[in-house]
Image (cartoon, helix red, strand yellow):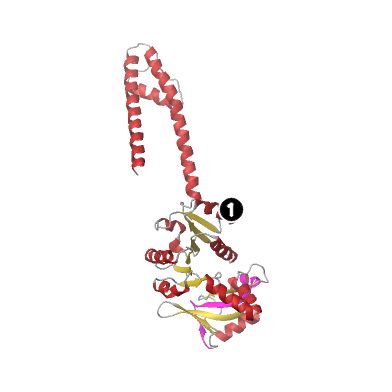
Amino acid sequence: MNIFRTSISRRTFFILIAIGLYLVLLVVLTSVEKSSQTSNINGFQDALWYSIVTLTTVGYGDIYPVTSIGRNIGYIFVLGSLGVLGLLISRITEVFVNIRETRKMGLLGSNYKDHIVVIGWDMFAQSVVDELIGAEKQVAVITDNKDHMVSIRARYNETDVFVLVTDYSNYAVLEKANISHASTVFLNFEDDTQKLVYSLNLKKQYGKVEHVVILNNADLEDTFHAAGVTFTLSKDGIAAKIVASYIFEPDVARYTVDLLSSAVADDDYDIQQYLVTDKNPHANREYKDVFQSLKNEHNIILIGISKLGEDGNRKLIKNPADTITVSPGDYLIMIMTGENEDPITELFGVSEGYNSTL
């Protein structure tokens, strides 16, 4: 900070010296030219006009010095015009470079809405983003490493992934990723303590945004839920369950892994959730009727429903009773193939996934 202030002070000092020298030259030029009967510089205003035209390299030639001293001063202005032109070019170049760097760093901001914000970048985050892109979700990645920006931009299209490079503790800059309009924030730090502290701070700044955290220590789940984190997972816990499943039920394990991945090809299977709106043809119908309709008409298997409780939290009901009513605001959980996605999106009037803006 002191170095920055010193630089500003020196710059101001030299600018003041240059302005003072310029005014002195104008006064001398006016004085010597007024004494000549053949001169067309008859006052300070004429001298000022001549200096401006010369320094900006316009050179109209309507006013010029005729005395030897005046011409010498003119030489100074001509040489000075080179410095002025060089300064203007360098400043303009600097402005464009700064704009380009600002854009590359993501500081011009994003207009994404209902997107996913990933804070912290590594190979695991990359795998998560690959799946999200496969599910046609837009992602804003926040990292504190410029090198990450280069690799992310090389891997993803700018229409799908926005990158913001900033200090994680600068919560005001996080809004450049339009985090207040995101559907979910995924915290991807190494240390569980850092994740907890960051979750608490994020909750203060953006209380309505859903938070997802991957834990190293599964015993901390209750602590994170108490801090307002919506969903927690343990990497080791997930891996252990799939490995154990494969040992005694290999086909179940293969099916589970397949369902966890986004459907890329038409024959790929995926578990998806869709919001039920007022205009949905299945709204206000019994679960068994919706189940049969989706199965018979689209070969889709309905496996659950998510309803909003009186406490404001969602409750996932697996294989609910046949008589339960599918209401607007519910989410239907379905097993479907990639070829079903477009027809169901058109039928339901909403895209796949959680819609925080609806």
The magenta span reads 323-341
Residue at the location (42% across, 73% down)? 225
Question: How far across and down, in percent of the image, does residue 263 sit?
Answer: 63, 69
Q: Nearer the viewer, residue 94 or 346?
A: 94
Which residue carries the number 1 mark? 154
Q: Nearer the viewer, residue 126 or 158?
A: 126
Question: How far across and down, in percent of the image, does residue 333 sit?
Answer: 55, 77
Classify residue 220 by image quadrant.
Answer: bottom left
Query: Can the viewer see residue 117?
Result: yes
What residue type is disc 1 on?
Answer: Ala
Q: Nearer the viewer, residue 157 or 297?
A: 157
Residue at the location (31% across, 16% down)? 31
Residue at the location (33% across, 28% down)? 17
Q: Is residue 153 above or below residue 43?
A: below
Question: How far across and down, in percent of the image, does residue 318 sit?
Answer: 53, 82
Say what secondary structure mark 1 lies in: helix
Q: How many marks?
A: 1
